[in-house]
Image: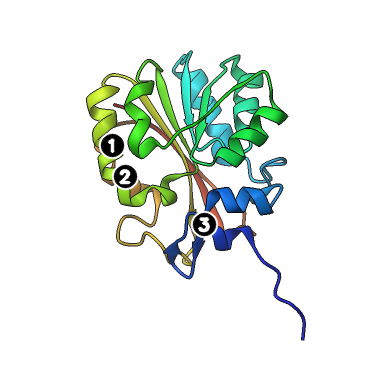
Amino acid sequence: MSEIKESYHDYVIKDGKFIGRFDEMYSKFDDPWTQSTQPNKYSRTAGIIHLKNFNIKTALECGCGLGYYADWIYRETDIVPKSIDISSIAIKKAKELFSDLDFEVADISKDLQKYNNYECVIFSEIVWYILEDLKKILEVLAMNFSGKYLIVNQVFYKGTQKYGNDYFTNIKEFIDFVPFKLLGQCEATTINDSTIETSTIFKI
């Protein structure tokens, strides 16, 4: 009988339930979500286009993981984002990979307001992991980042979503959920993908 190979997904969301053991995941897996190659680039590219279109000069990236998107943002825009992640292991690895960038351990459900000097907040594929705190986080943004920007890069699933269905299942439902003014949106996929890449920008 063949052994079932462990997946990094099991440390994040499993059987429709949020697990959130990110430090363990980053300790056991070198490149979860293939961050080093970022094979599906639609939402991340759109996020960078948002930064350029609205002439944004400073950004807080929430959920930076290993730092590859922060490096991409820097190379495309000259912005060195303040990049934060809840996983201390991810931040340690990001600092080793990109020592010239700015990484810090933080939990946005508790620490977000202290970063309100940044012009734009980017949720980097983290919405599914902050669902329980999302309304509170949006309230913190409204109170502390008024007049600034929120960019959300997020994946949705083609009929296979098991988690978060009571919140939203597609970009339209997500836009309706967010209490800020929508400035731009992008939705893309390929015929072979099981997911739909999206990126939205709001004025807070």
Q: Would you name the residue on which mark 2 appears?
A: 134
Q: Residue at x 47, y 16 (%)?
A: 58
Q: Which of these two is toward me, 182 or 137? A: 137
Relative to residue 161, is residue 98 depicted above or below? above
C-alpha span from label 2 to label 1: 6 Å
Q: Position of residue 88 (x, y in %)?
A: 56, 38
Q: Position of residue 119 (x, y in %)?
A: 40, 17
Q: Would you name the residue on which mark 1 appears?
A: 138
Few, some or many residues within 10 Å of mark 1 (<14, 14–19, 20+): some
Q: Which SS class for mark 3? A: loop
Few, some or many residues within 10 Å of mark 3 (<14, 14–19, 20+): some
Q: Residue at x 71, y 29 (%)?
A: 96
Q: Quadrant of the N terminus?
A: bottom right
Res 202 seen here? no
Marks 2 & 1, CB-CB < 8 Å contact: yes
- Left/right of residue 35 with respect to residue 184 in the rendered view: right
Few, some or many residues within 10 Å of mark 2 (<14, 14–19, 20+): some
Q: Which SS class for mark 2? A: helix
- Look at label 3 and name its amino acid: Val
- Left/right of residue 16 with respect to residue 173 in the rendered view: right
Relative to residue 69, is residue 27 depicted above or below? below
Q: Which SS class for mark 1? A: helix
Q: Would you name the residue on which mark 3 appears?
A: 12
- Look at label 2 and name its amino acid: Leu
